[in-house]
Image: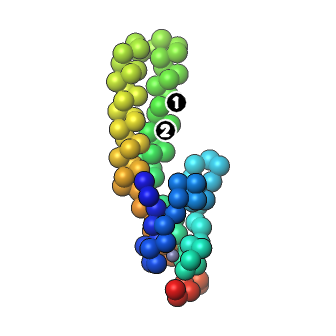
């Protein structure tokens, strides 16, 4: 789940990569501290993580209210964890093209 700037190769730690997500879990544009380009998470991987996180809540609620049995819930949660890991693997930082903003060179 390592994040790298596609322009200059600057590495972001897991903690730093939280800068690209707002408090609702939506993608946020954030400048690379090294080259200043506006970056954000690629849509596909991030949406996979977001929807998997949301469905884990739904499955938990369904188990608690006995709408599905616990073993079906456990299988569903395993699939959700797999989806989150896949999303984390596919998620990449991409350059966000902002109209009128010229990227500063490295
Ligand atoms: Zn950079």
Element type at mark 2: helix
Q: In this view, does 63 lie above or below 85?
A: above
Q: How many C-alpha atoms fall within 10 Å of the one at disc 2: few (<14), some, or many (≥20)?
A: some
Which residue corresponds to mark 1? 57
Q: How is the image coloured?
A: rainbow
Q: Quadrant of residue 49?
A: top left
Q: In which quarter of the image is residue 102?
A: bottom right
Residue 84 x, y percent position in the rendering: 41, 42
Distance Cα–Cα, label 1 vs label 2? 7 Å
The circle on residue 18 is none
Foreground residue among 91 and 12: 12
31 sits to left or right of 59 = right
Residue at 46% across, 62% down: 3
Q: In this view, does 83 lie above or below 57?
A: below
83 sits to left or right of 34 = left
Residue at 42% across, 54% down: 1
Residue at 62% across, 54% down: 22
Q: Is residue 22 visible?
A: yes
Q: Confirm or reject: label 1 Cβ below 8 Å from ligand 1.
A: no
Residue 74 x, y percent position in the rendering: 39, 21
Which residue corresponds to mark 2? 53
Q: Is residue 91 above or below residue 36?
A: above
CB under 8 Å between discs 1 and 2: yes
- Residue furthest right as drawn: 23
Element type at mark 1: helix
Number of marks in picture:
2
Q: How many C-alpha atoms fall within 10 Å of the one at disc 1: few (<14), some, or many (≥20)?
A: few
Residue 80 x, y percent position in the rendering: 39, 35
């Amino acid at each position: 789940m390592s994040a790298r700037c596609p322009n200059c190769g600057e590495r972001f730690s897991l903690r730093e990569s939280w800068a690209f997500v707002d408090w609702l879990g939506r993608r946020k544009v954030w400048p690379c501290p090294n080259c200043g380009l506006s970056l954000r998470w690629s849509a596909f991987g991030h949406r996979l993580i977001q929807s998997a996180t949301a469905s884990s809540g739904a499955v938990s609620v369904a188990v608690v209210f006995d709408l599905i049995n616990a073993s079906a819930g456990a299988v569903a949660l395993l699939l959700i964890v797999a989806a989150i890991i896949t999303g984390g693997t596919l998620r990449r930082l991409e350059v966000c093209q902002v109209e009128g903003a010229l990227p500063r060179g490295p």
